[in-house]
Image: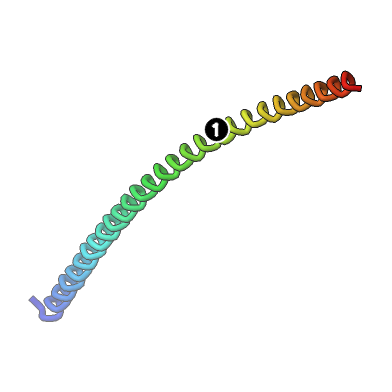
């Protein structure tokens, strides 16, 4: 075999080996990055889920507090209405007593 042909074949084999190693390395790095991204996404999803659950619980608690508050407001409105009627009745009674005294 001619030494020039041998050198060309050796060069082709070396270049092919370098390309194959480069491709394998690139694939390996891409898989590693993809796995890291999945892990990060899973952690983020878990943390987001916990935060959402906590937010939902806080909203439920606030809703209960608002319902209690509204109940108090309704009761106070009824009390104030009754108080107003009672005050009118007292005023009428005072006026009647005053007329009787006169």
Name which quarter of the figure residue 14 lies in. Answer: bottom left
- Above or below 14: residue 45: above
- Residue 29: image x %, image y %? 25, 63
| Horizontal side, residue 71 vs residue 58: left or right | right
- Residue 8: image x %, image y %? 17, 76
Q: Residue furthest right?
A: 102
**Colour scheme in use:** rainbow
- Quarter of the figure that contains the C terminus: top right
Q: Residue furthest bottom?
A: 3
Name which quarter of the figure residue 33 lies in. Answer: bottom left
Q: Which residue is mark 1?
A: 67
Q: Residue furthest front?
A: 101
- Above or below 90: residue 51: below
Q: Between residues 90 and 59, which one lies in front from this camera angle?
A: 90
Q: Residue furthest left?
A: 1
| Horizontal side, residue 32 vs residue 7: left or right | right
């Amino acid at each position: 075999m001619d030494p020039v042909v041998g050198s060309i074949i050796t060069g082709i084999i070396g270049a092919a080996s370098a390309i194959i190693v480069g491709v394998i390395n690139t694939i390996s790095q891409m898989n590693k990055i993809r796995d890291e991204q999945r892990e990060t996404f899973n952690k983020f999803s878990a943390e987001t889920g916990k935060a959402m659950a906590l937010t939902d619980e806080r909203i439920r608690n606030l809703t209960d507090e608002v319902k209690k508050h509204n109940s108090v407001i309704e009761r106070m409105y009824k009390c104030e209405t009754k108080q107003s009627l009672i005050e009118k009745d007292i005023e009428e009674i005072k006026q009647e007593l005053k007329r009787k005294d006169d």
